[in-house]
Amino acid sequence: MNHLDQLRGVRDPAPGPVPLYSSPEHTVYWIGCQEDSPFRCNVYLIIDGDMHILFDPGSKMHHFPQVFERVSQVCPPESITHVVLHHQDPDVCDSIPDWLAIAKNATLVCTPRCRVLLPYYGFSADVPWLDVSPNDNTLLELPSGKVLNFITSPFLHFPEACVTFDETSGFLLSSDIGAAIEHDWRIVVDDWDTHWKAMVPFHVFYMASNRAMQGFLHKIEPYPIEAILPQHGSVIPKIHVKTAMARLKELPCGIDLLYPASNIEQALQALSR
Ligand SMILES: [Fe+2]
Ligand SMILES: [Fe+2]
């Protein structure tokens, strides 16, 4: 069952994990964090039988104590079986050494280009890895029989970033795509126009280009997305998913703005249409 309707507009959920979807076999939790910053980071946890999958666990100093405490309210932290790292940023990955010290057999899930960078956070590369293929055919089969599907999102914003589609809930755990910088944060978007204004600056400054965004949006079109769960800002529920994707499809960002086409190039592009 999807709980997003009941959570729309909630500003400060009680401290602790919040179930966003739950069924007897499968639960998706928003883990946190509580942060005094509009850049606040979202960590998520999926429990499916004996698979306990942590997403983008955050930084050592700013997030780890809180995330550890909140995960403990759901499952023993040492029982984490997988840590999914959608890209290499410190607000996503800096706490990996702490998690590997606790969940000693956890598999790290990320793309190969991300994998070469992660040991620089300070752990041995000799840990279990699951490489996310750029062919977008990397699946993690869950005890419930459903899968997590890992899909690359090139240059959004890391060259080989990825996202996760959870087949059970229909949630797209989108990392920085769909993110927003919000002073007046709510766990789930309730006013689209206000939220879009908070999404625009993040995408303009972080995403490589509109072409990269269009390619990714085309790739995920076949997936029945029930909600977008970004790493920053509010969860985008189904009622706003199509609008969010349509607005992102049109948004110039990154090098579109830094290196705009010259007048002659624009005229040639217009003639070729
Ligand atoms: Fe990032
Ligand atoms: Fe981020």
Image: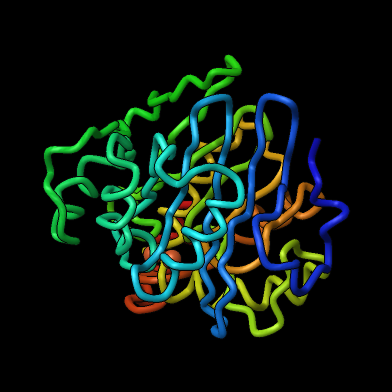
Question: Above or below — where is 233 with respect to 113?
Answer: below
Q: Is residue 215 left or right of residue 262?
A: right
Question: Above or below — where is 239 with respect to 149?
Answer: below
For residue 187, which quarter of the picture? Answer: bottom right
- Residue at 73% across, 41% down: 21
- Residue at 58% across, 28% down: 48
Instruction: Tell me where residue 75 appears, x and y as whole percent.
Output: 55, 42
Q: Quadrant of ligand 2?
A: bottom left
In the orientation shown, which residue stands out farthest toward the top?
Answer: 145
Instruction: Tell me where residue 123 appears, x and y as whole percent.
Output: 15, 53
Q: Is residue 255 left or right of residue 37?
A: left
Asked whether residue 267 appears in the rendered view, the answer is no
- Residue at 28% across, 48% down: 100
In the orientation shown, which residue stands out farthest toward the right?
Answer: 6
Q: Is residue 132 left or right of residue 124?
A: right
Q: Nearer the viewer, residue 271 or 164?
A: 164
Question: Above or below — where is 226 with respect to 41?
Answer: above
Q: Nearer the viewer, residue 220 or 121?
A: 121
For residue 235, which quarter of the picture? Answer: bottom right
Instruction: Tell me where residue 41 appears, x and y as whole percent.
Output: 51, 68
> Total of numbered circles in the picture?
0
- Residue at 59% across, 57% down: 31
Quadrant in which the N terminus is drawn: top right
For residue 62, which quarter of the picture? Answer: bottom left
The figure's colour scheme reads rainbow
Question: Above or below — where is 144 with respect to 224?
Answer: above
Q: Nearer the viewer, residue 196 or 138?
A: 138
Instruction: Tell me where residue 45 appears, x and y as whole percent.
Output: 55, 46
Asked whether residue 4 appears in the rendered view, the answer is yes
Q: Nearer the viewer, residue 226 or 126?
A: 126
